[in-house]
Every structure is written in C-alpha cells, then in structure tokens.
Image (tube, helix red, strand yellow):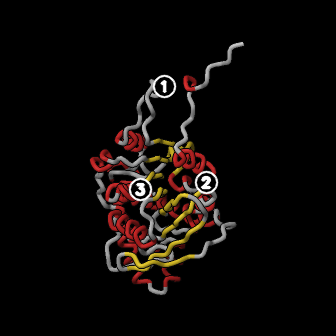
C-alpha cells in the first residue's frame, strides 16, 4: 500500500512538472567545473542574483513556470545537481552537505559573492545547508517543502523509507525510461542507490538552524511530506511565531502554508509561490490596522 502511494507521488511529480513547462523556452545552458564535475546551469532575467535549486530526481525544466516568473525581476541562476539533468554523476556520495558545497563552489566559479536562494524539496534542504555552512553567501533563503530533521517527516513516509530500493524505482515507467536513455543502466542504478541513501540521512540540524541569522521564508503545503508541527517548529527556531502589533518589528523570517496542497503540488502553483516569494525578497511587510495612517480631520 505504502509503496503504491510512493509510486503515485513520484509519477505525479514527474508528469505534472513536465506538463507545466510546455510553454517554457529553455535558456542557453552552460557548464562550469565544480568539485570535480561539470555542473550544468542556466541564466535568465535581470536584477539581483537568485539561485534556484531543484528537487530530487528533477532538473531545471521540471521546476516549471516558477523560474521564468522569478526571472521577470531577478537574474536567475538555475543549477542542476550531481547526477541530475545535464550534470554528470561522479564517484562521491550525494549528501546535502556535498550538494551545498557544490553550490558554494559554483558561486565562486561564476563570481557570485552573495545571492538570494530558492530551493524546493531536496533543493530546500541544500539551501538550508548552504546557509548553515556558508552564511556569508546567502542573502535571503526561500525554503519550500523542507525539514531540518528526519523525525519531521510524516509517519507514513517514514514507514516507506526502509522499503525503498533500486528495483522499486526501476519498476516505475518514468525511471525505467530515464535508465534506458542514460545509456548506462548500471551507472544510473548506482545513482538511484545514492539517492536512496540520501533519504536516510539523519539530518538533525536543529542547533544549526537555531543559530541561523539568514532570513528564511518557509513555504509548505498543508498536506506536505513534513508535518505541520515540524514546519512550525522550524519557524520558531528562526525566531518566528511571536505576536505582532506590539510596537516591535516582525521577525525577519516568515512562514507560508499553502492550502489543500501536497508535497508535489507545492511547485505546481507558481502564481501562489511568487506572491509569497517576491514580497519576502523585497522586504515588504503587510500593514496592520495600527500601522495605517490616522484619518484626516475635517
């Protein structure tokens, strides 16, 4: 039962995100040498730099329409992680720390001293590690569908983890087709094994998150893979959850919960995402009743 649910979730993610980019025109891609591999990336738009980090088993295309929307007001650097999309796999474990170090090295390679970062799912986990390991490189972080501890996953997903296997993935048509197109099924199976190992990474980053000074916008679906309690806990670790209207500025970090939204549906709502992301990156805060100008006297 759980395995069938997992297959449905993966297939939904792949199908929906591919469909959402039908009208997306791919930018000119480039490669840069990063930590012993050739990393693929695309640049689009003009404005302050914003790095976009995709989810597991995804790539730039499957991030959908959010990239061109962000490129309307930012210079977007969209990356493809080790073994994903057009970036080669190398003989190294895939860990959140390794991927975060790749992003830091990428920034050095292309001359980005500091940038805003938007990450979804695995990309959000990597964004957290980037802010933890290289805080000077991250201006603001948008973290969509992330967790800071393995204990934060929904129980039904935690029950699935021991059942994950290369064979389970390859039994799904999407992954079987990717394996076939790779031209090297054995190498692709080794990549899947690394990705399964990543799912078991304990994380336990509470103390690191608590020390973060980087403003973070946490975005999650109300039916996401992380529990709502865990998401709120992350917000509180970042100083959120206090009462406003008390004459003090609100915390720099923010929380947005998307209604009727599963994990895979978070990235398929670009218009809603952009309505959260843009005000955060611009530092705009909604005005409360007590912030309104007093009425003019007659």
State the residue in front, 194 or 143. 143
Q: Distance of mark 3 from mark 1, alpha carbons?
A: 29 Å
Quadrant of the rendered structure where residue 284 is?
top right
Task: Determine whether, in the image, residue 238 is placed left or right of residue 288.
Answer: left
Q: Which residue is located at x 68 percent, y 14 percent?
A: 297
Give the percent coordinates (x, y) of residue 273: 57, 50
- Give the vertical position of 197 relative to 184 (above or below): above
Residue marked by disc 1: 245
Q: Distance of mark 3 from mark 2, alpha carbons?
A: 23 Å
State the residue in front, 127 or 10. 127
Residue marked by disc 3: 138
Label 3 element class: strand
Label 1 element class: loop
User: Could you classify mark 2 by the number of other residues whose Cα lies within 10 Å: few (under 14), some (14-19), or many (20 or more)?
Assistant: many
Q: Are marks 3 and 2 in contact (CB under 8 Å)?
A: no
Give the percent coordinates (x, y) of residue 236: 37, 38
Q: Is residue 194 visible in this depiction of the protein?
A: yes
User: Could you classify mark 3 by the number of other residues whose Cα lies within 10 Å: few (under 14), some (14-19), or many (20 or more)?
Assistant: many
Label 2 element class: helix
Give the percent coordinates (x, y) of residue 190: 37, 78
Residue marked by disc 2: 270
């Amino acid at each position: 039962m759980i395995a069938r649910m997992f297959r449905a979730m993966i297939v939904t993610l792949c199908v929906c995100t591919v469909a959402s980019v039908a009208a997306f025109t791919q930018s000119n891609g480039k490669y840069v040498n990063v930590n012993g591999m050739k990393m693929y990336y695309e640049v689009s738009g003009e404005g302050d730099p914003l790095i976009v980090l995709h989810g597991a088993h995804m790539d730039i295309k499957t991030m959908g329409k959010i990239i061109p929307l962000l490129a309307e007001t930012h210079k977007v650097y969209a990356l493809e992680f080790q073994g994903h999309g057009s970036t080669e796999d190398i003989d190294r474990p895939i860990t959140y720390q390794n991927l975060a170090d790749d992003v830091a090295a990428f920034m050095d390679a292309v001359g980005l001293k500091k940038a805003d970062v938007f990450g979804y799912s695995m990309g959000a986990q990597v964004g957290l590690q980037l802010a933890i390991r290289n805080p000077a490189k991250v201006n603001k972080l948008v973290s969509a569908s992330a967790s800071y501890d393995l204990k934060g996953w929904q129980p039904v997903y935690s029950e699935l983890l021991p059942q994950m296997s290369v064979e389970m993935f390859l039994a799904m048509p999407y992954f079987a087709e990717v394996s076939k197109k790779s031209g090297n099924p054995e190498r692709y199976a080794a990549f899947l094994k690394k990705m399964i190992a990543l799912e078991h990474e304990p994380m336990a980053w509470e103390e690191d998150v608590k020390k973060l000074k980087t403003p973070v916008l946490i975005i999650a679906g109300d039916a996401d893979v992380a529990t709502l309690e865990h998401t709120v806990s992350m917000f509180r670790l970042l100083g959120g959850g206090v009462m406003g209207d008390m004459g003090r500025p609100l915390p720099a970090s923010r929380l947005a919960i998307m209604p009727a939204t599963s994990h895979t549906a978070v990235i398929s709502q670009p218009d809603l995402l952009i309505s959260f992301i843009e005000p955060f990156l611009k530092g705009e805060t909604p005005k409360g009743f007590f912030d309104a100008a007093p009425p003019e006297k007659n």
